[in-house]
Amino acid sequence: MGIKKGTKLTDHPKNQILRIRMDEDTANKLKAVCEKKQKSMSDVVRDGIEQQYAEIKK
């Protein structure tokens, strides 16, 4: 079985799925950040993880 047509080839495939629960206020904040920064929810969450990880590695 080969690679599907139209699949982006990358060194870091995003094959992990995370499902989280949050209250409405947090969801609204996430949506506001996404709109302001013109990023997807996934990108905003990944950015947040990178920031938190950098903070603990100091």
Image (spheres, rainbow, N blue to C red):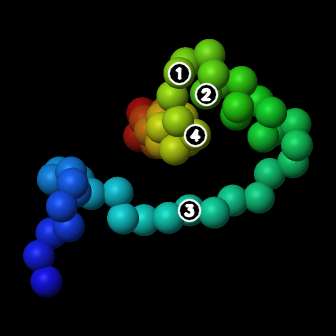
Quarter of the rendering containing residue 20: bottom right
Q: Which residue occupies the foreground of this view, 54 or 30?
A: 30
Q: Position of residue 56 (x, y in %)?
A: 49, 41
Find residue 12 and name its label. none
Q: Classify mark 2: residues with Cα within 10 Å, few (<14), some (14-19) or many (20+).
A: some
User: Split into 4 quadrants, where in the image is the N terminus?
Assistant: bottom left
Task: Evaluate if marks 3 and 1 touch, with contact meaning CB atoms under 8 Å apart.
Answer: no
Q: Earlier in the sequence, mark 3 or mark 2?
A: 3
Local secondary structure at mark 1: loop
- Which residue is painted at 48% across and 38% down in the image? 43
Label 4 sits on what residue type?
Answer: Met
Residue 27 position within the rendered picture, expressed as x and y whole percent measured from the top left: 78, 40
> As displayed, is residue 39 above or below residue 3?
above
User: Is residue 40 something that shows in the picture?
Assistant: yes
Number of residues whose C-alpha sits closer than 10 Å to that of mark 4, classed few (under 14), some (14–19) or many (20 or more) = some
Q: Which residue is mark 2?
A: 34
The residue closer to the viewer here, 1 or 44, is 1
Classed neighbour count for the residue bearing mark 1: other residues with Cα under 10 Å, few (<14), some (14–19), many (≥20)? few
Instruction: Tell me whether circle 3 and circle 4 mark residues in contact (CB < 8 Å).
Output: no
SS at mark 2 in the image? helix
